[in-house]
């Protein structure tokens, strides 16, 4: 029996990506356009999983007035579309990468979800979510979805599909934690924001991850860009570090990591293998302008180049 995954993206976007030598605030900036494509955190995860031959169904909300780009993507990738259409436009997000790798994001607002539209989505999820092995919930909430309603929905969703992978930030992250998801993947900045102070050492990061595990989360993965990632669960702590890569765009690197984590979980792989795979997929993603695994041999080679070791082999107090 094949494994099935559902991703939920409440607030998708068209990502307009560009490169610029140096962003000058208040001045005219000439940008080299890289791409514009249908995206959103859960949709990016779905693209990775489809490239790894996993059946994926996507849920969430799409604006009726500019849905075509998303429909074309779903058809091209073989993604099963269960999005709810709502009045208005799906938002556009601008992603500008400077020569030093610094990313500036400008996110526009989009549609607003009505109470009736939310109730329709809630009803659909209760009927269908028990058909999936893993449910991935990613990204921000659009206008109209109340945080308390979202938290309640997540708790109900966990009853239908106990294996929930959750990736969000700010108030949405805090609300989702109350549902005790199976795995979460904050980046370092998001973890620092949640904890309320900087986390300069690996001990700081790991101790903060343990705080989240104390809230009922079984697996905590902290992504740290070029510095790699840390996985903390009941079996121990592992640290990965990717090789140096030529960075075209970091957009979607975290989502690519989530896709790798989900694939490893589906295959019942070890914690070490899962982190190595997820780190390799994330590292490959920064070499391209769009999310995806286009070359499986290249992925295998990248996995071999990822450094990975248990935390117990390191001396305490090392700076990440």
Image (spheres, helix red, strand yellow):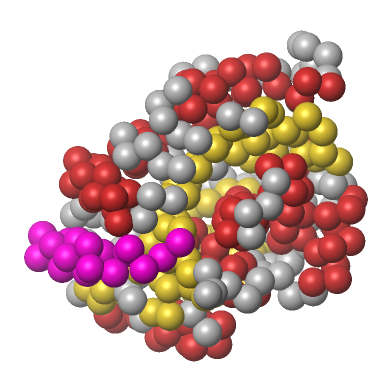
Image position, residue 59 (x, y; %): 35, 68
How many numbered discs? 0
Image position, residue 172 (x, y; %): 34, 41
Can residue 39 be seen from the camera position used here? no
The residue positioned 48% from the left and 53% from the top of the image is 106
Left or right of residue 58, residue 264 in this image? right
The verdict on residue 18 being magenta is: no
Left or right of residue 246, residue 208 in this image? left
Residue sitting nearer the eye, 228 or 237: 237
The residue positioned 86% from the left and 41% from the top of the image is 307
Q: Quadrant of the C terminus?
A: top right
Check the image and report above or below for 315 versus 294. above
The residue positioned 68% from the left and 52% from the top of the image is 269
Image position, residue 70 (x, y; %): 44, 79
Q: Main secondary structure of the magenta part?
A: helix
Residue 311 lies in quadrant = top right
Q: Which residues are magenta?
A: 115-133
The verdict on residue 128 being magenta is: yes
Can residue 297 be seen from the camera position used here? yes
The residue positioned 83% from the left and 14% from the top of the image is 315
């Amino acid at each position: 029996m094949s494994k099935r995954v559902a991703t939920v993206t409440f607030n998708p976007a068209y990502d307009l990506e560009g490169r610029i030598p140096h962003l000058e605030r208040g001045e005219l900036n000439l940008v080299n356009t890289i791409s514009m494509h249908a995206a959103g955190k859960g949709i990016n995860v779905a693209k990775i999983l489809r490239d790894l031959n996993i059946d994926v169904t996507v849920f969430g909300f799409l604006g009726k007035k500019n849905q075509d780009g998303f429909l074309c993507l779903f058809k091209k990738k073989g993604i099963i579309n269960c999005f709810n259409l709502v009045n208005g436009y799906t938002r556009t997000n601008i992603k500008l990468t400077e020569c030093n790798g610094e990313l500036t994001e400008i996110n526009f607002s989009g549609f607003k979800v009505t109470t009736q539209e939310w109730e329709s989505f809630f009803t659909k999820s209760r009927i269908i979510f028990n058909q999936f092995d893993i449910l991935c919930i990613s990204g921000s909430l659009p206008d109209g979805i109340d945080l308390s309603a979202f938290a309640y929905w997540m708790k109900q969703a966990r009853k239908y599909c106990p294996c929930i992978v959750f990736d969000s930030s700010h108030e949405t992250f805090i609300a989702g934690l109350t549902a005790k998801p199976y795995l979460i993947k904050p980046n370092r900045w998001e973890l620092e924001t949640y904890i309320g102070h900087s986390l300069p050492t690996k001990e700081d990061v790991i101790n903060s991850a343990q705080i989240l595990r104390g809230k009922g989360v079984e697996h905590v993965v902290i992504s740290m860009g070029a510095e790699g990632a840390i996985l903390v669960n009941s079996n121990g702590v592992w640290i990965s570090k990717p090789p140096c890569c030529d960075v075209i765009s970091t957009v979607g690197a975290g989502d690519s990591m989530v896709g790798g984590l989900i694939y490893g979980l589906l295959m019942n792989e070890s914690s070490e293998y899962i982190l190595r795979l997820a780190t390799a997929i994330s590292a490959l993603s920064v070499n391209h302008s769009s999310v995806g695994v286009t070359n499986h041999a290249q992925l295998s080679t990248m996995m071999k180049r990822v450094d990975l070791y248990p935390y117990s082999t390191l001396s305490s107090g090392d700076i990440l």
